[in-house]
């Protein structure tokens, strides 16, 4: 099983596609190391995310605590506090670090509302490479504002031997916004095609399967159903900053327990978990994020092996690329089947703008406001 732990909703970025930073959590109410110690060992993958996890003063303590409990531990970060990440990496060089990067130079800074963000992220990456990090890379969200730079971002990752994690614009209850839909779906989806070809040309088998994941993102961008059914609540779970456990990070109605007051076994075996798994089986959302896609692509019986469907696609198209043959994307993806995006104002850049965040308290339980947001 995989698990993602949202350590905080505090964030020192001001992203146009996520307004977590406008509604930070109170540090005194955030999940404690003592509560996280209740998690069992044996996870396949554990992701520490946010908000911005490096804003936790006890992040290093949390990594020390959870590192032995998982086969792979990842920190998803904006990379603006390189000193904290470097200290962790020197102690645990196998920790996977993905720094969010939405474009080259000023493009990143505008989308993420970060003053000199691109330069600071590059400096952090240099420090992490020098510190001996063995699993480093950038993470990018495909959207209208950066789809023309996807190959540039991929090649930037390759320049230091890193990897590129990808996702597509989507809504989620913790984002406090509901306008994360592409303005030009076809243009954004088409922009992913050259990236898929480059991934298949790579010598890394992991990149070949990332190509399949990105094919799923093309379908997601167009508003089409998932290529493989979701396994939320079975193969992956989320813990929010207040210790609440969710089957996924999109639907607030899929809360299944509270790690602060229950044991992990009680949560997994409880009636709310069983009900959430039933709801997931009927879920109308077409989410295709790395967490839900990666687990869905795994073999049901051997977690380190892929399912036959993505394996067959990867082998067939790796051969095509190897022999110089084109991939017929119009056969793979129905470009005539395009969802209509809602008419919403263009997502604005918050770079340099004045804004006073409003702290949200554990008692407020605001998630229900976003329960009916559909990802299409």
Image (cartoon, rainbow, N blue to C red):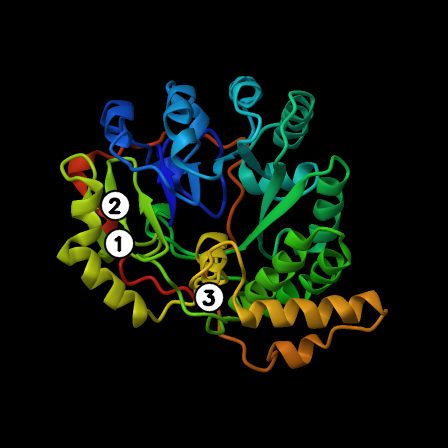
Q: Label for residue 343?
A: 3
Q: Upstream in the sequence, badge 3 or badge 1?
A: 1
Q: Nearer the viewer, residue 65 or 374?
A: 65
- In front: label 3 or label 2: 2
Q: Upstream in the sequence, badge 1 or badge 2?
A: 2
- In front: label 1 or label 2: 2
Image location (x, y in percent) of residue 50: 40, 36
How many labels, in total?
Answer: 3
Image location (x, y in percent) of residue 37: 28, 29
Q: Nearer the viewer, residue 181 or 172?
A: 172
Secondary structure at badge 1 equals helix
Q: Quadrant of the C terminus?
A: bottom left
Position of 159 relative to 273 (above/below): above
Q: Residue at x 62, y 66 (%)?
A: 189
- Mark 3 touches mark 1? (CB < 8 Å): no
Position of 66 relative to 17 (above/below): above
Q: Label for residue 252?
A: 1
Position of 35 relative to 341 (above/below): above
Q: Is residue 321 left or right of residue 38?
A: right
The image quadrant that residue 80 belongs to is top right
- Mark 3 touches mark 2? (CB < 8 Å): no
Secondary structure at badge 2 equals strand
Q: How far apart are the alpha carbons under marks 1 and 2?
A: 10 Å
Q: Is residue 289 left or right of residue 39?
A: right
Image location (x, y in percent) of residue 13: 49, 33
Q: Label for residue 245?
A: 2
Q: How far apart are the alpha carbons under marks 3 and 2?
A: 34 Å
- In front: label 3 or label 1: 1
Position of 237 relative to 23 (above/below): below
Q: Is residue 252 left or right of residue 118?
A: left
Q: Nearer the viewer, residue 360 or 290?
A: 290
Q: Label for residue 306?
A: none
């Amino acid at each position: 099983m995989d698990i993602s732990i949202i350590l905080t909703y505090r964030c020192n970025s001001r992203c146009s596609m996520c307004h977590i930073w406008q509604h930070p959590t109170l540090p005194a109410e955030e999940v404690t190391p003592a509560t996280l110690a209740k998690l069992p060992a044996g996870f396949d993958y554990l992701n520490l995310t946010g908000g911005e996890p490096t804003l936790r003063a006890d992040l290093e303590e949390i990594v020390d605590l959870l590192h032995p409990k998982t086969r792979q531990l990842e920190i998803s970060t904006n990379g603006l506090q390189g000193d904290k990440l470097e200290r962790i990496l020197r102690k645990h060089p196998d920790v996977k670090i993905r720094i969010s990067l939405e474009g080259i130079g000023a493009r990143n800074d505008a989308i993420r509302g970060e003053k000199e963000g691109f330069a600071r992220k590059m400096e952090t990456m240099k420090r992490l490479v020098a510190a001996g990090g063995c699993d480093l890379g950038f993470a990018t969200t495909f959207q209208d504002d950066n789809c023309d730079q996807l190959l540039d971002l991929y090649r930037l990752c390759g320049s230091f031997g890193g990897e590129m994690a990808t996702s597509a614009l989507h809504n989620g209850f913790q984002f406090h916004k509901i306008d994360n839909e592409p303005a030009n779906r076809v243009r954004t989806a088409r922009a992913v095609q050259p990236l898929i070809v480059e991934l298949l040309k790579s010598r890394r088998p992991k990149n070949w399967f990332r190509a399949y994941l990105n094919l799923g993102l093309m379908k997601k961008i167009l508003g089409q159903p998932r290529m493989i059914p979701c396994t939320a609540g079975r193969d992956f779970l989320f813990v929010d900053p207040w210790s609440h456990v969710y089957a996924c990070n999109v639907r607030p109605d899929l809360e299944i327990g509270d790690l602060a007051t229950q044991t992990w076994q009680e949560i997994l075996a409880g009636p709310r978990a069983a009900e959430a798994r039933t709801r997931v089986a009927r879920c109308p959302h077409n989410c295709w994020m790395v967490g839900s896609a990666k687990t869905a692509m795994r073999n049901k019986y051997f977690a380190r092996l892929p399912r036959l469907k993505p394996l067959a696609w990867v082998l067939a198209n790796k051969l095509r690329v190897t022999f110089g043959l084109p991939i017929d994307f119009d056969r793979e993806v129905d470009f005539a089947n395009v969802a209509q995006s809602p008419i919403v104002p263009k997502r604005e850049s918050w770079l340099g703008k004045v804004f006073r965040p409003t702290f949200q308290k554990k008692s407020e339980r605001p998630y229900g406001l976003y329960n009916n947001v559909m990802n299409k």
